[in-house]
Image (cartoon, coloured by chain):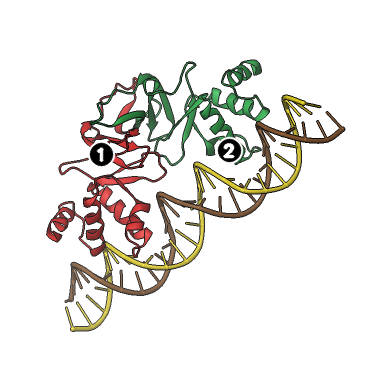
Chain colours: A red, B green, C yellow, D brown
Amino acid sequence: MKNEIDKKLTDKNIKPTAMRELVLQVLSEQKTATSLPELERKFEKADKATLYRTLKTFEENKLIHSIDDGTGSVKYALCQDACECHPEDLHVHFLCTRCKKTYCLNDITVPTINLPKNFSLESVNMVVKGACSNCKS
Amino acid sequence: MKNEIDKKLTDKNIKPTAMRELVLQVLSEQKTATSLPELERKFEKADKATLYRTLKTFEENKLIHSIDDGTGSVKYALCQDACECHPEDLHVHFLCTRCKKTYCLNDITVPTINLPKNFSLESVNMVVKGACSNCKS
DNA sequence: AAAGTTTGTGCAACCCAGTTGCAAAGTTAA
DNA sequence: TTAACTTTGCAACTGGGTTGCACAAACTTT
């Protein structure tokens, strides 16, 4: 258990502290992406700033990626193992407008776009909104 | 001039007040999408809340649409004449990571996505990031 | 093992976009 | 002109995100 978590951290060159183990543990358990405020609620004890910096560290080291789904708080989810967060690695995200959960649609990669002349591409944020299978009446 | 602006407002069932005429005027002049804070700076005089509510009114009446480009402030741009803001009307937006301007790529409609079973689609926010033609070195 | 260095954590304070309540001003209707 | 409604302006607040700083914990070096 703990060893798997620690391995994930060290594989990405992140020193495995107690805090980081806990946060990664929780993130691993989620089926949908998690925001900083949500994380704060899950860890009554922990400090917002620490959680914030933990997420930043994870993101910089490509352990997680962030999704801005327009709900006002950025959400985070684990990257796929080999993910380098390059444009061709990116997948579509789905925000359920009912339950406000954000899903990583890992097997739906973002479509290629033909940009206008002299525009260069760095990344894509694609959020599809609608009702998820749980909420669809 | 003023008549065109007023016509656009009344066509969308928005009462043409002085404030609204001014805001629509300014929005019409922009080649890129405009945020509330930017608008505040353009109108030193006007109140934030009024501008805010003006934008909301415009958006509700489908005169403008909003784009969350992840910069921390939502941006607004005029809709195309016949726009109903339905999924099939939506276009891709481009955020230049250098100059932070957000372009409506009006002739690039968002690609169709095959959602998982029992997921329904309401709308799509697709923001491509990179360097625009002005900023590309 | 002690002193020094680096890294991580916790607290407090802050910034800023967005939002709301309320009262004053303006507009429309009777 | 009065009454009803709409718009505007001010002030205050919310909440997510961010930073400075001091303390604690973990590595280094001798």
Respond whether the residues carrying marks 2 and 1 are from the same subunit: no
Q: Which residue is mark 1?
A: A104
Q: Mark 1, chain letter? A: A
Horizontal and vertical percent position of residue A72:
42, 44
Front-most of D20 and B126? B126
Residue drawn where x is 15% and y is 52% of the image: A11
Query: Contact (CB < 8 A) between labels 2 and 1?
Result: no
Q: Residue at x 52, y 24 (%)?
A: B63
Q: Which mark is residue B40?
A: 2
Classed neighbour count for the residue bearing mark 2: other residues with Cα under 10 Å, few (<14), some (14–19), many (≥20): some
Left or right: A95 with respect to B49? Answer: left
* Tag 1: amino acid: Cys
Q: Quadrant of residue A74?
A: top left
Report the quarter where the C terminus of chain A lies: top left
Q: Position of residue A63 (x, y in %)?
A: 22, 48
Where, quadrant-wise, is the N terminus of chain A in this rendering?
bottom left
